[in-house]
Amino acid sequence: MERVFNFSAGPSMLPEEVLKKAQEELLCYGESGMSVMEMSHRSADFEPIIAAAEESLRKVMNIPSNYKVLFLQGGASTQFAAVPLNFLSNHKCADYIVSGQFSKKAAAEAKKYGDIAIAASSAGANPTFSTIPETTRSDFRPDADYVHICYNNTIYGTRFHYIPDTGNIPLIADMSSCILSEPFDVSKFAMIYAGAQKNVAPAGLTIVIVREDLLGNARPDTPAMLDYKLMADNDSMYNTPPCWCIYMAKLVFDWILSIGGLEEMKRRNERKASLLYDYLDSQNYYTAPVDKKCRSMMNVVFVTGDAELDKKFAAEAAAAGLKNLKGHRSVGGMRASIYNAMPYEGVEKLVAFMKKFALENPKGYNV
Ligand code: PMP
């Protein structure tokens, strides 16, 4: 069977070049005589892989030397707990901007550990979470230990169109669905974290990029596995790390470097997103229910306005080799996740399919 265009929100497509390289090296990596999947994480074969992965990521994201890079497990959801456990250290209070399901979950988890305020929320927008709240410095409590945001809202298809000004308060961002999609100034954030399963690697790896001076103040009852300082002191090898995912992540970082880095990645992503949004803006059959200035470059949400038609769309698109276009169960409609590895051709095919579907299914007649 031919490979399809997979619009899944994650796990999602990986670059074909990366999959081929992994295939080449699958049985026998270099001179090791074994697969990376079979290697001891403490072996002379694996240690250069994790070191090279970190070096490549530092280069790709231009990560300043006063930041630690951690390769962890547990997904982004585990960081929802690890963040307050590690950083609610001075005043035991933190502020969250709630712009979707994941920031809502992050705030709810943090509430178990301290005084958490919702500094701003777009839950009340119509449709809910279809925009990003505007904030100024005065929205944050001066004694907050940190401010937390979710930079790109995978489910609702929005993203921050600005970096909140938090003054001296450390800003922490969940970048699960936008990391590596464009250049970010890491120094503007105290910490960035991301589950790998969208733009980085197979599921099972979580990337944490954290400013060194914030480490070492975790609550005494913090589980060892959630203590960033312990993980940093052990170079992400306190226990067995997700070795295969780290290897795959390294291949992805190297692939991004080989195409020209994050500037080129951004150019490609903008080109793909524009193709889809420009089409959505040019017609009346589909609606993009998101505030224009906050449109995600990674997750494009659209609806026909008719739940039965939406269902038919997703089913017929899948049959045409355009898979996983059904929107999240809490939103309905369609969602095209067009992460780094989605080729331009995939979006061209999607737009062509959308045009054909609209012609073949006039509203009010066919359902
Ligand atoms: N944050 C965002 C923005 C996400 O998209 C997701 C998952 N889709 C999560 C957090 C949760 O990630 P995980 O499944 O790795 O825990």
Image: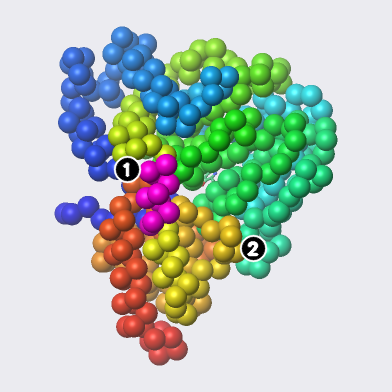
When asked about the image quadrant of residue 346, the answer is bottom left
Say few, some or many: other residues with alpha carbon within 10 Å of mark 2 (under 14 / 14 to 19 / 20 or more): some
Amino acid type at image mark 2: Thr
Side (left or right) of 248 relative to 124: left
Any part of residue 223 in sight: no
Does the magenta-highlighted stretch encompass residue 244? no
Side (left or right) of 336 relative to 119: left
| Cα distance between the residues tagged 2 and 1 | 31 Å
Q: Residue at x 40, y 90 (%)?
A: 365
Residue 48 image position (x, y, % from top left): 33, 15
The residue range painted magenta reads: 263-272
Q: Which residue is mark 1?
A: 14
Amino acid type at image mark 1: Leu
Q: Residue at x 75, y 35 (%)?
A: 167
**Foreground of the two, 304 or 262:** 262
Helix, strand or loop status at disc 1: loop
Mark 2 Cβ inside 8 Å of ligand 1: no
Residue 338 image position (x, y, % from top left): 40, 54
Q: Residue at x 26, y 66 (%)?
A: 320
Q: Which residue is mark 2?
A: 128
Which quadrant holds the N terminus? bottom left
SS majority, magenta: helix
**Foreground of the two, 221 or 137:** 137
Side (left or right) of 359 relative to 294: left
Circle count? 2
Q: Which mark is residue 288?
A: none
Does the magenta-highlighted stretch encompass residue 268? yes
